[in-house]
Amino acid sequence: MKRFMELIRECLSGIREIMPWDLVERQQTNPDLLVLDVREPYEFDAMHIPGSLNVPRGILESACEWDYEETVPELVRARDREIVIVCRSGNRSILAAHAMQVLGYSNVASLASGLRGWKDYEQALVDRAGGEVDLDDADEYFTPRLRPDQLRPKEASPA
């Protein structure tokens, strides 16, 4: 059985990753570039890269094809466009890039470090209404909050 990070590493072997500063450069040189955010809608509404398209990871494969309720026409038509996929930390975007390559997308990359890295590079983030997000508030948003029941159980110590 594979663990999550093993799956990520396996998929990463065939995925191109770019850094936030590379994305800034790509956006300047390629106005047709599509930034695809695969986080959940509530995450996207809180903050996202201006101009990005939100297609949650859970419906991505059907959103990439015609004739499904989840079909996103812009995404279906983007098979030959340069696409940079983003998520919170850069893991879901690797899985999404892998799936899109399998589906025939020819020029996809994952944003290494995700939106956390984008924020650390001090690039603009906007909320659902298009208002700029204060980067200090983004720090709080990106701080992991694990409940006790989400933590790996500690091994019982020998008596």
Image: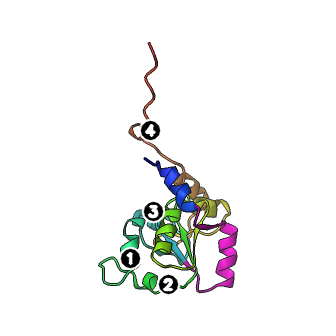
Residue picked out by circle 4? 151
User: Considering depth in this image, is 5 or 63 the residue closer to the camera?
Assistant: 5
Q: Amino acid at mark 1?
A: Ala
Q: CA distance from mark 1 to mark 4?
A: 33 Å
Query: Which label sits on residue 63?
Result: 1
In front: label 2 or label 3: 2
Closer to viewer: mark 2 or mark 4: 2
Residue, disc 3: 43
Image point (65%, 73%), residue name:
23
- Give the SS element for disc 3: helix
In the rendered image, residue 138, in percent from the top left (x then y), is placed at 56, 58
Amino acid bearing label 4? Leu
> How far is mark 2 from mark 4, CA to CA?
40 Å
Residue 61 horizontal/vertical position (percent): 39, 72
Instruction: Check the picture and name the quadrant holding the C terminus.
Output: top left
Q: Looking at the image, tell me whether mark 1 or mark 3 is earlier in sequence order.
A: 3
Which image quarter: residue 42?
Answer: bottom left
Q: Which residues are magenta?
A: 13-34
| Marks 2 and 4 close (CB-CB < 8 Å) | no
The crowd level at tag 1 (other Cα within 10 Å; few <14, some 14-19, many 20+) is many
Q: In this rendering, is residue 46 above or below 68?
A: above
Q: Residue at image x 41%, y 71%?
A: 60
- Residue 78 badge: 2
Mark 1 or 3: in front is 1
Write the residue at 51% across / 48% down. 144
Q: Earlier in the sequence, mark 1 or mark 4?
A: 1
Identify which amino acid the numbered label 2 is placed on: Ala
Q: Earlier in the sequence, mark 2 or mark 1?
A: 1
Circles 2 and 1, Cβ within 8 Å, touching? The answer is no
Earlier in the chain: of badge 2 and badge 3, it is 3
